[in-house]
Image (tube, rainbow, N blue to C red):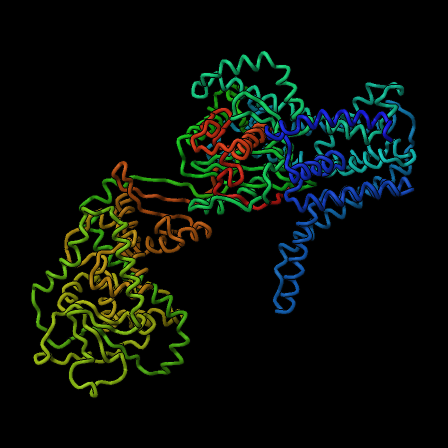
Amino acid sequence: MVNMPALEQMNQILHILFIFLPFLWALGTLPPPDALFLWAMEQVLEFGLGGSPMSTHLRLLAMFMASAGAAVTSYFIPSTVAVVLFMTGLGFLLSLNLSEMGFVFKHSVTRQRVRTKSKTLPNGSETQFTWKECVFYIIMLVLALLETSLLHHFADFSQISRSNPQAIVGYILMILLIILWILREIQSVYILGIFRNPFYPKDVQSVTVFLEKQTRLLKIGVVRRILLTLVSPFAMIAFLSLDSSLQRPQSVAVSIGFTRAFRMVWQNTENALSEIVTVSVVHSLIFSKDLWWNRSLDTGIRLLLVGLARDRLIQFISKLQFAVTVLLASWMEKKQRRKSAATLCIFNIVFSPFVLLFIVFSTLLSSPLLPLFTLPVFLVGFPRPIQSWPGAVGTAACVCADTVYYYQMVPSLAAALQSAMAAGSLGLLLPGSHYLGRFQDRLIWIMILERGYTYCCINIKGLELQETSCHTAEARRVDEVFEGAFEQEEYARVCSLNEHFGNILTPCTVLPVKLYSDARNVLSGIIDSHENLKEFKDDLVKVLVWILVHDCSKRSSVQENVHKTENKGKEPVVILPTLNPSPQPHCPEDMDSLNSETFDDWSDDNIFDDELTIKKGKEEKDQLKVLPDTNLSLPGSVELGKVGDPGKLPENSLYQTVILGYPAVDKGKQDMAYIPLMEFSCSHSHLLSFPKEWRSNCLPDSKMKEMSSLFPEDWYQFVLRQLESFYSEEEASDVLEEIAKDKVLKDFYVHVVMTCYFSLFGTDNMAPSPGHILRVYNGVLPWSVALDWLVEKPELFQLALKAFRYTLKLMIDKASLGPIEDFKELTNCLEEYESDWYIGLVSDEKWKEAVLQEKPYLFSLGYDPNMGVYTGRVLTLQDLLIQVGKLNAEAVRGQWANLSWELLYATNDDEERYSIQAHPLLLRNLTVQAADPPLGYPIYSSKPLHIHLY
């Protein structure tokens, strides 16, 4: 063995290779073991076994083992008919999304068992859909096996001839390929990425107009889908079944070649069609049997070589385009031109054969072409899987407050992508392809992970919404590219050219997606108008009444049965706070001190010094949480339960109250202040009464009487009469009329409403300032005794804050749309706020919940310190158009390879490094953002999403 020539040559080659290994390792050309292993499995699975790169490493390993086992098993099957049937059937099954189908089937079986145990009627929409899909696959499998067996058994395998059945099927496939290519190109905005498609709608801005104009294209898409899904696979199976190579003795080449061929028919129908047509054309042109192509190779190996050559040719063209773009941009783009640009250009021109050699070498290895620091200095990156990153897809993202908007839009986007992919609007769907979507300030990065029969697996990433200067520059170029494609005038030229052909982004189509549009308006002239602010205080009392009445109504609907069982005909007894209490000494200085304590430290001079105010509020709130759930005294207050003979007072806590805010009184001069028992005049009034803890008092009686004049009694009566009935329709009007006439209940509402009003505004009759409106809207209220009382009741505090925010939105609507005419219109407006709007803060958790629940509208108040203006932000849920374009996949892989090399090998983590700066042609900053963390920073990354293509 020592003297074997082959071993001696291998020994010499390896000695030379080992010398260069440290140099290749330093340049980052040697792959890590895990990347090399996954890359090798992907290459063998795709080109040797007819599969597809998979969405996860576990799926890749499982599919590789199953596909390799199928190829090995086919070698040991003696019968030609049996081996053809085996290859056809297993090729079809392996091309399906078996794991997803198994998961759905298991879930449906588990759910059916639960329903059977609970004896509930099953809602079989999803189950029926799954079974319909399974029935379709079973029918396709049976037809494919039947066709294969019949053609292989009865066909006449004659020698090479232009009139044999296989040649005729080859001509049919040529026609099918041309038709499918035309139908696919018609669906996109550009033909070959260069010429404007005359059949595509020109001015695409409205969803309704676009869908009307796209009707013809949708019909063409249906025809293409039928030809691609139903007709083409059976035509290709006929071509393969009629091949004479299957009649020869079984060999390794035949097993591998035809196992791959029968698998590719289903796994990637368009690529398989182009390969078979190429082999058929070459077969018809080279008629001689003595040529190497016909003599030494069977049809399966020819298809394998053609598929490998097709893939490498596409990669070479993409890499060459990427290299030319980097080279030209370094010289032609002024912002990208450096002092060494001329030197690098001359260097690339002089050593162009070596540059081409690097491109060819990276193409053969299917590894990324690495532009060093994104300069025109090219290296060969190490081979890696198409995902480019080692982690699992969708497990890492830089989550922030804006992530929720991508969460909301992804289901609708996936449905729109399903229609576009099935119609062919996004071009040829290959694993490793990248797409970029754009809407307002949102950028969506879409990557194809896996492709099979009637399904496609994708990953969707969302890029940051807070645009930096580099982000803005590239986003502006993306907008220009899409505007040039989709926003043309009707009288524009029929076949115009793509003005941005050199860009790595090629527009494809627009997708109607249900998402939130973001509008920001300046509220100058509205929120600072004295008349509007004066009306604001009057409207706030009305809104407080409406919200409290409806809250009690909802509460009573839940507790109605409890009340019925407890009362059993007894008249409800309540304690009405501060009704005719014993006279108390009153001093004007006390109210002055109350006003000064409330507002002196809360002036408009510190309007935006919210940090200190919020901190103080939180400390006070935390202190309040420590207090037990009893009525405690404040300094200077009088606790009646401790005055006089305690034995004469009942133990029931309802018979005692705490009067807060009164001046101190000498014990000898203090009179007893009992709260008399009051009964509701209507037996149904308890349905709208407040919880027990809301019944305490915190304001002097004189102040309460003074503020009660602001209570809108006519509005209160109207709101009560508009409530939904608690009983039958016949009794509705009578019951509500009796409740509306109950004075005790009305006084109860006067107390709670005006106390909340005082805690929000204080006793000052002046109109509030815009700064006051903003602070209270943000939940930062001025301190007062009433605020302490309100904070101890979190539910009531939230209702008061909700009323304040509704009132602000009402003020803006009145200023924009006109005044409210009557109570009925005001009620309709408030009901719309309750059902269709979320009015609050962007930072609130409820804001995120409203977005995920798809509330039709969201509103938030803000302030722009740079411009010094108040702003209103309105999110509107509607069907809007997302513009989608296809990216040069090799440009993305090359920039990601440079990012990995620069941060991990060169350890250049400078945040302002050249390779992360804006590049309008390469979209360098956006590409870096879309990389997986920690090197990239997308704010959203989905799990692998399975899209059905039928």
Q: Is residue 97 left or right of residue 575?
A: right
Q: Nearer the viewer, residue 20 or 524?
A: 20
Q: Is residue 209 left or right of residue 104?
A: left
Q: Is residue 97 above or below residue 785?
A: above
Quadrant where the image shows the N terminus: top right
Q: Tell me where residue 753 sits by quadrant.
A: bottom left
Asked whether residue 60 is in view, the answer is: yes
Q: Is residue 387 above or below residue 677?
A: above
Q: Position of residue 488 (x, y in %)?
A: 47, 25
Q: Tell me where residue 666 sits by quadrant.
A: bottom left
Q: Tell me where residue 224 sits by quadrant.
A: top right
Q: Is residue 7 above or below residue 694?
A: above
Quadrant where the image shows the C terminus: top right
User: How many numbered tags mark residues here?
Assistant: 0
For image coordinates 45% across by 38% down, the residue present is 442
Q: Position of residue 75 (x, y in %)?
A: 86, 40
For image coordinates 32% across by 71% down, the residue present is 691
For image coordinates 30% across by 62% down, the residue present is 622
Q: Is residue 28 above or below residue 326?
A: below
Q: Position of residue 134 (x, y in %)?
A: 71, 50
Which residue, as the protein is rendered here, is positioned at the far bottom?
647
Q: Nearer the viewer, residue 310 or 377?
A: 377
Q: Nearer the viewer, residue 29 or 480?
A: 29
Asked whether residue 483 is in view, the answer is: no
Q: Is residue 868 left or right of residue 251?
A: left
Q: Position of residue 664 (x, y in %)?
A: 11, 72
